[in-house]
Amino acid sequence: MKCFMDVLVGDEEIYKAELQEYDRAVKYLGKCAHMLGLDPSVAPCDLDEESSDLVLDSYSSDPAWSAQGKCRMRPPEDINVGRLVFELHQKQVPKTCENFKCLVTGERGVGKASGKSLHFKGCRFHRIVKGFMMQGGD
């Protein structure tokens, strides 16, 4: 059996918020580009500095749009930097494989005594030795 975990670098909540801000700019540009003399098919990140400033000024002065929150002209940097793939040998160590799979999927919920989540999501790696090992946890 194979199991995988995506490795993220950065704060997932900040990334999601910045992505929403960029999506707002995409939607605003799609609706209002013609009023600004811009091509609505052009992505906000592809605009020159002058056009970007025009969009940001127009957005911030539009009460209906600006009430939705900030917008940004550049998409956030991707925080997904890779995927770890683990091959689990069920025939040799079935209980270990089952426990590891449950920590990856989070299907066991929270610990009875500790009340902590029983999964790897959000765990940070504090030591990485390339080609050898990674250490992490709380």
Image (spheres, helix red, strand yellow):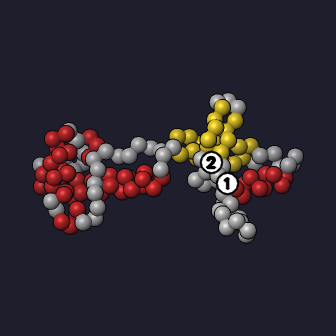
Q: Is residue 45 above or below residue 121?
A: above
Q: Secondary structure at mark 1?
A: helix
Residue 115 percent across, percent down from the top left: 67, 67
Q: Please give the name of the residue rendered at 28% of the width and 57% of the height, measured from the top-left corner.
A: 70
Q: Please give the name of the residue rendered at 52% of the width and 40% of the height, measured from the top-left corner.
A: 81
Mark on residue 5? Answer: 2
Q: Please give the name of the residue rendered at 28% of the width and 43% of the height, measured from the top-left corner.
A: 45
Please rate how many residues cluster around mark 2, counting C-alpha atoms within 10 Å: few if below 14, some from 14 to 19, many from 20: some
Residue 52 percent across, percent down from the top left: 20, 45
Residue 24 visible somewhere in the drawing = yes
Q: Secondary structure at mark 2?
A: strand
Q: Amino acid at mark 1?
A: Val
Separation (CA) of disc 2 from disc 1 = 7 Å
Where is mark 1, residue-wise?
104
Are discs 2 and 1 less than 8 Å apart at CB?
A: yes
Q: Amino acid at mark 2?
A: Met
